[in-house]
Amino acid sequence: MNVIVASVALFAGVVVWWLAARRLTTKPWEAQGSFDGREAAQVQGPAPARIGLWVFLAVATSFFALLVSAYFIRMSPRLAQGVVLRDWRPVIEPSILWLNTGALLASSMGMQLARAAVGRGDVARTRTCMLAGGVFAVVFLAGQLLAWRQLQAAGYYAAGNPANAFFFMLTALHGLHLIGGLVVWGRTVSRLPRQGAALGTTRLTVELCAVYWHYLLIVWLVLFALLLNT
């Protein structure tokens, strides 16, 4: 039952993310073909995009909560009455995970600085901070892959025991969410205007990217603390 619920939650999360990403990268004024349409889109457009993001975050939170619950249930030696499993062997977390956490924190800070800069209309600083946030996010993902390689070199494979499987699954799903964010981040950076030009609807996209990055940082801190303490 938990597998079915988790699968449904994941599918719903992917669908909502796709819709939200389309909303963040579309130009609703183009359908109206006038400058007035663009002005109206700037006034009325933010609400649906923000709602779409928050709906997706709610679905993602439910999904990760299910995984954390399954983690604790599977870690317990007694799954059900009369069923005792003692095959859980904790994973020794690679020390590089601490560096990865720092990289993701720096990425989130870069996005927040970009959010502050876009609020002031500073295009150059917005671009610089957005690029820094994206680069640190890529560093985080590269570090996660390196952590996987270190575990495999030490003999910790996903099929080895349930603890290994959960480690690879949790870190992989978090990484996939970050990759999805990088897709929107890349489109946002490419749409940033030159210095002196109006930011327009890009302002909203930068703000939502920052919110999404903060969310992924919180999720990772929860997962990291869970892995360290179990």
Image: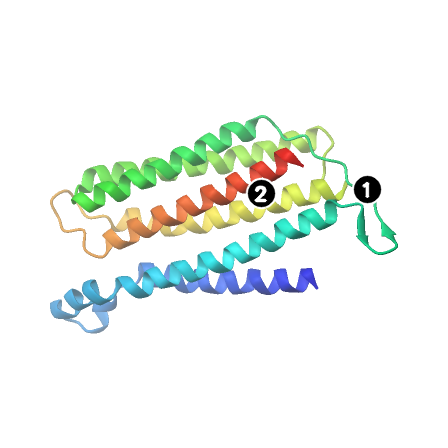
Residue, far top: 95
> Which residue is denoted by mark 2 in the rendering?
171
- Who's the residue at 54% across and 57% down the image? 62
In this orientation, which residue lies closer to the viewer: 50 or 199?
50
Where residue 36 appears, as percent x and y from the top left, is 12, 69
Real-space Cα distance between discs 2 and 1? Answer: 21 Å
Q: Quadrant of residue 10?
A: bottom right
Q: Is residue 88 left or right of residue 20?
A: right
Q: Locate the C terminus by quadrant.
A: top right
- Relative to 124, does residue 187 appear above or below in the rendering? below
- Who's the residue at 69% across and 47% down the image? 72
The kind of residue on which mark 2 rests is: Thr
Circle 2 Cα neighbour tier, 10 Å, few/some/many (<14 / 14–19 / ≥20)? some
Q: Nearer the viewer, mark 2 or mark 1?
A: 1
The kind of residue on which mark 1 rests is: Asp
Q: Quadrant of residue 22?
A: bottom left
Circle 1 Cα neighbour tier, 10 Å, few/some/many (<14 / 14–19 / ≥20)? some
Numbered disc total: 2
> Which residue is denoted by mark 1 in the rendering?
87
From this viewpoint, is residue 158 visible? no
Q: Is residue 31 left or right of residue 54?
A: left
Where residue 122 appears, as percent x and y from the top left, is 17, 41
From this viewpoint, is residue 225 visible? yes
- Who's the residue at 62% across and 33% down the image? 228
- Who's the residue at 52% across and 32% down the image? 143
Q: Are marks 2 and 1 in contact (CB under 8 Å)?
A: no
Where residue 29 appears, as percent x and y from the top left, is 21, 68
- In what element is the residue under mark 1? loop
